[in-house]
């Protein structure tokens, strides 16, 4: 499930922040395998606090990071660890896309159920740079919080997910093999 957010982020400001701190980051690692197309900068909690407060999630464990995926690279199907829910905020001129259960969605800013649903990022000629929050909270709680603040773009969401109000976040037994710490992503990536 993807929920579009009605939120504006100063892309230039936060994009510059990422590139200014590029040297502090590193490639994503899965065990011994380094994914040399997926680069992250962590330890930005203080720097992005204005955004965190706007979203009303400063009391949660959210682990914000800049997540940069190189052009023409595919991030294979997986489910994120710990049943997290994600907030992705696009920092590039072009809207990135995410494929969930074989359906692709373009977004600017979204809440996305990456801890329960199989998803991938298909190759694109443009790089992808998002400010991502990996939130240890449950889907309904996050939805309610964002809705209370008027941050849910209901019109845009209903167009791609007509039944989003009835959505239940469930990690099915069949999909558990896709959870990342079980190495599923490595098998595809090497
Ligand atoms: Fe993911």
Image (cartoon, grey):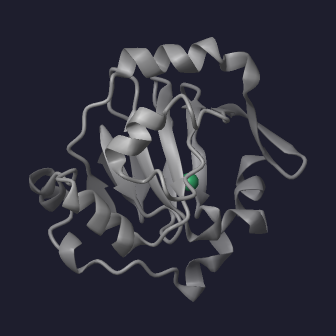
Picture quarter containing residue 138?
Answer: bottom left
Quadrant assignment for ligand 1: bottom right
Which is nearer the eye, 78 or 23? 23
The residue furthest bottom is 173
**Image point 49% across, 29% down: which residue?**
129
Compared to 115, does 11 lie above or below? Answer: above
The residue furthest left is 155
In-image side of 163 versus 39 (left or right)? left
The residue furthest right is 32
Compared to 126, does 77 lie above or below? Answer: below
**Image point 49% across, 32% down: which residue?**
48
Query: Residue 166's x, y, as percent?
Result: 22, 80
Picture quarter containing residue 26?
Answer: top right
Compared to 31, does 179 lie above or below? Answer: below
Compared to 173, does 62 lie above or below? Answer: above
Query: Residue 167's x, y, as percent?
Result: 29, 77
**Image point 35% across, 74% down: which residue?**
140
In-image side of 115 versus 34 (left or right)? left
Is residue 77 at least partly visible in the picture? yes
Picture quarter containing residue 183?
Answer: bottom right
So how many labels did they put on this image? 0
Query: Residue 142's x, y, as percent?
Result: 37, 65
């Amino acid at each position: 499930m993807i929920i579009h957010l009605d939120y504006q982020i100063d892309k230039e400001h936060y994009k510059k922040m990422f590139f200014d701190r590029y040297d502090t980051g590193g490639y994503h690692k899965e065990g011994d395998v380094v994914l040399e197309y997926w680069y992250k900068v962590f330890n930005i909690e203080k720097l992005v606090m204005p955004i965190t407060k706007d979203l009303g999630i400063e009391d949660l464990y959210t682990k914000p990071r800049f997540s940069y995926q190189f052009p023409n690279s595919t991030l294979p199907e997986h489910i994120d660890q710990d049943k997290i829910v994600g907030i992705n905020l696009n920092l590039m001129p072009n809207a990135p896309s995410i494929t969930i259960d074989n359906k692709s969605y373009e977004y600017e800013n979204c809440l996305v159920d990456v801890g329960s649903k199989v998803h991938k990022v298909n190759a694109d000629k443009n790089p992808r740079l998002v400010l991502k929050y990996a939130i240890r909270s449950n889907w309904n709680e996050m939805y309610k919080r964002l809705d209370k603040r008027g941050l849910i773009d209901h019109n845009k969401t209903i167009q791609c997910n007509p039944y989003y109000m009835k959505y239940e976040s469930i990690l099915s037994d069949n999909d558990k093999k896709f959870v990342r710490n079980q190495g599923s992503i490595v098998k595809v990536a090497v």
